[in-house]
Amino acid sequence: MRELETHNLRVLIANERKDRLALVAPIVGALGHEVIAREIDVKDVGRVTARERPDVALVGLGESSDHALELIEKIVHEAACPVILLLHAPDQGFVEEAAKRGVFAYVTDAAAKDWQSSIDIVLRRFAEYHDLEGAFGRRAVTERAKGILMERHSVDEASAFEMLRDRSRSSNRKLVDVASAIVDGHPLLPKHP
């Protein structure tokens, strides 16, 4: 696995309570990270996330659990960074709801000294998640390309894969790039030679 930079991060913090934002920002700064945005409004957090592209987001539970869950959903929807839930005290029910919406971890105020360890773990899991997501995407493209070759050339799956692999080698291109070209171009090809 490639080495991740987990220091000097760009951090977005979000909470409906300004006083909580004011408490969290110095802790994040003391960890050596830069707070790039402090968001309160649900309507703004998605746009800010897309514009600022933070490395990680910390979302606090304020007065309303619905507000916090909406913040999480907006940030996760942008898929720009992992989200860590900040709680004043453990709340298993809320953690479960937040997990359904895409948080990668939670921390409590009491464990502020452990936040960096949590951030390190979350960033690794987020990178693994995106690597896995990419692998599934590449696999899907390859499978679609094999299906197209099987149909167009009346060959079995193994032969279709051989065709892909041979073309990849002869053109010195990645197999997924060859597969993508087939998938992208197949509507232009005749049904049968």
Image: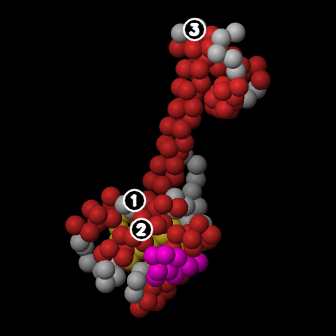
Classify 95 as above or below 40: above
Does the CB distance between marks 1 and 3 fall below 8 Å? Answer: no
Residue 159 x %, y %: 58, 10
The 10 Å Cα crowd at callout 1, few under 14, some 14 to 19, many 20 or more, is: some
Q: Specify the amino acid type for callout 1.
A: Gly
Please tell me which of labels 1 and 3 falls first in the chain: 1
Q: Residue at x 53, y 61 (%)?
A: 78
Instruction: Examine the structure image and report whether residue 35 is included in the region drawn in magenta.
Output: yes
Q: Secondary structure at mark 1?
A: loop
Left/right placement of residue 124 relative to residue 163 reads left
Give the residue number, with chain letter if any, for mark 1. Answer: 102
Give the residue number, with chain letter if any, for mark 2. Answer: 72
Would you identify the image quadrant in which residue 65 lies?
Answer: bottom left
In the picture, the disc for residue 155 is 3
Q: Which residues are magenta?
A: 33-44
Q: Secondary structure at mark 3?
A: loop
Does the CB distance between marks 2 and 1 fall below 8 Å? Answer: yes
Residue 79 x %, y %: 52, 58
Q: Secondary structure at mark 2?
A: helix
Residue 102 x %, y %: 39, 59
